[in-house]
Image: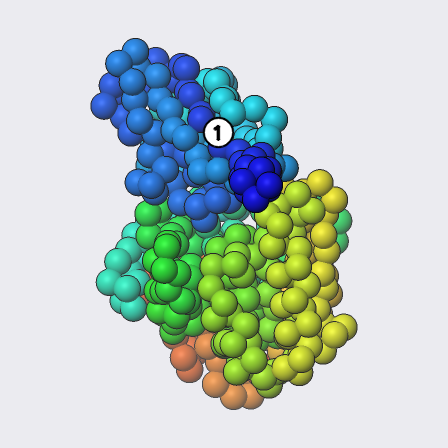
Amino acid sequence: MRNIFLFILVLTVQQAFTQVTVYVDSVPPSTPDSAAIYIAGDFNGWNPGDNNFRLAKDSTGVYYITLKARDEGTKILYKFTRGSWATVEKGAAGEELDNRQFTYGNKDTLHLQILNWADMSGGGGGSSTADSNVHVMAPSFYIPQLNRHRRIWIYLPPDYHLTSKSYPVLYMQDGQNLFDEETSYAGEWQVDETLNKFYAAGKAVPIVIGIDNGGSLRIDELTPWVNPKYGGGDGKLYVKFIVETLKPYVDRHYRTLPSRESTAIMGSSLGGLISDYAAVDDQKVFGMAGIFSPSFWFSDSVWMFTRQHPATENTRFYLLCGGDESAEMVPDMLAMKDSLIAVGFHKGDIFTKVVPGGQHNEKLWREAFGQAWLWLSQEKATAVNDAALPQKKLKLYPNPVGSVLNVDFLPGRGKDSLEIFNANGEKVLSVENFKPGKLNVQHLATGLYLVKIITANAVYVSRLIKR
């Protein structure tokens, strides 16, 4: 009788768990014969080059991998890569693909095809989709805290070159995916298109700074703590880079509102984790945080960290996830709301939303971005003119100019200052105690500039063409 009971028990356990072998029957013709193919998903932290999830290759050229047994009914999300998100699979015409899905128990083998790669023919969509007010601020910006370099993007509001306004700033993770389909590895957020539509509708929009992730270093940089399986732990230094190096640079070179009330941080997945960390750790710097599909599962240290950092400022948090993400996603996100309230953040400053059927992908975050920014900013962080002073036309001649420019304005009752910004919005010249008269601009490169004079009584603005 005991043996029969054990047999039934073993059979029940065997039936509760199933495994699956995934076969990639065909890959794009451009795939090198020596290519390594990986499967990345919610089961391995979306690590695109995890050697534990590298596919084997049989004598006929078919790639395959057997995933570990899981409970029947467990759903996983995944994609294939060649070791990085820059080489993620794409559709036949280079279009973005939704995450693949599989539910354990339906079958024990999968036969799939990979149609295209992001870095090969058609993989980038063919051309840039970034609007004209987006550009690369720095192709290789130095990160002294981590001794490495990174591409930095900038979005400037459509009226940036037409006025002397100063703007709130939104710092965002995974810059590759924010503005341009061509550089994205899983589809872009359309941040520029969304904000340009807001501007056309009369809404205030921010300057956006997009920080490229470090590819294979992404997990390390976007996690403040070490996970025994996935590593990580450089997140504190990464946030120090934003706070101590990048933000001061942006505030010096662009017309920003540097206060915490006008400074936001946003990201998804691990980017959501690091954005939450930054907002809690650096409350004097960030007054708003957009936290999408946050990877709170990465380390239980996030809960102790939150308890050890009580609220000292009024900070707004927008937390969002999809209903069809991992089993831990929704309860973890709601638990973070409770944790933030428990340490003193105001309940009314914390927004949570679960999107029914939403998955862990750019589509979810793209569709959520606009409303998240509107809720976070509440148009309180609107772009403002310098000290609300009246704006007046600045007289510049000759214009176009060669080497010496005449600057004519009515001096104020104190010390007047001059600032010149290039076509990318970067400050290229600043002169304190400036008096009406001649200015040597021989060193300026050929192009279009905005010249601004700030006095105690008014702000004078005019465009300048340097020939």
- For the point 76% across and 73% down, the residue is 348
Residue 275 showing in the rendered view: yes
Question: Could you tell me the amino acid type at mark 1?
Answer: Val
Q: Is 184 located above or below residue 466 in the figure?
A: above
Residue 106 drawn above or below residue 283? above
Q: Is residue 256 visible?
A: no
Q: Is residue 184 left or right of residue 140?
A: right
The relative height of residue 348 versus residue 147 in the rendered view (above or below) is: below
Q: Write the residue at 28% across / 55% down.
A: 149
Point out the image quarter for the N terminus: top right
From the image, tell me which residue sits under label 1: 20
Quarter assignment of residue 21 = top left
Q: Residue at x 46, y 77 (%)?
A: 417
Near-viewer residue (114 or 127)? 114
SS at badge 1: strand
Percent x, y of residue 277: 50, 69
- Residue 43 coordinates in the image, percent (x, y): 48, 44
Quarter of the figure with residue 427: bottom left
